[in-house]
Amino acid sequence: MSACMNCGRELTYNEIGAHKKFINRGSTRFLCRDCLAEKLGVSPQLIDKKIEDFKRQGCTLFV
Ligand SMILES: [Zn+2]
């Protein structure tokens, strides 16, 4: 399992998916939800909401 490249926290499958979706699909190092939100200048809750949206669309990057 990967760790967040910024804070070192262990990443979930969906956090890795979110990073791929928001930053770069080809990434090999990832940010956790909180660090991703900070980098993008949005709230962590928005990241959660987006993950739910992507799941509903059947995106395979999320479970
Ligand atoms: Zn982090």
Image: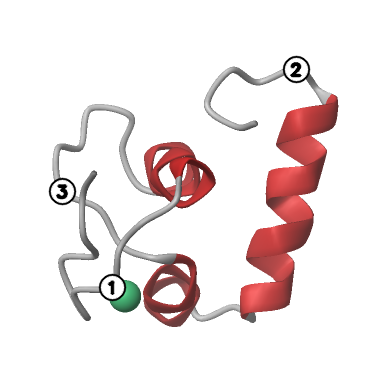
Q: Is residue 9 left or right of residue 46?
A: left
Q: Is residue 21 left or right of residue 45?
A: left
SS label for mark 2:
loop
Percent x, y of residue 58: 75, 17
Q: Earlier in the sequence, mark 2 or mark 1?
A: 1
The one nearer the camera, 44 or 8, is 8
Q: Which residue is mark 3?
A: 29
Label 1 within 8 A of ligand 1 by Cβ: yes
Look at the numbered disc 1 and give the secondary structure of its residue. Answer: loop
Q: Nearer the viewer, mark 2 or mark 1?
A: 1
Image marks 1 and 3: residues in contact by CB distance under 8 Å: no
- Residue at horizontal 59%, vertical 78%? 42
> Measured from the top left, where is residue 21 in percent x and y?
48, 38
Looking at the image, is 62 positioned above or below residue 12?
Answer: above
Residue 28, above or below 32: above
Question: Which residue bears the numbered disc 1?
Answer: 9
Colour approach in the figure:
secondary structure
Q: Which mark is residue 58?
A: 2
Q: SS of the residue at dot 3?
A: loop
Q: Amino acid at mark 3?
A: Arg
Amino acid type indicated by mark 2? Gly
Q: Position of residue 4 (x, y in %)?
A: 24, 65
Dot placed on the residue nearer the N-terminal end, 2 or 3: 3
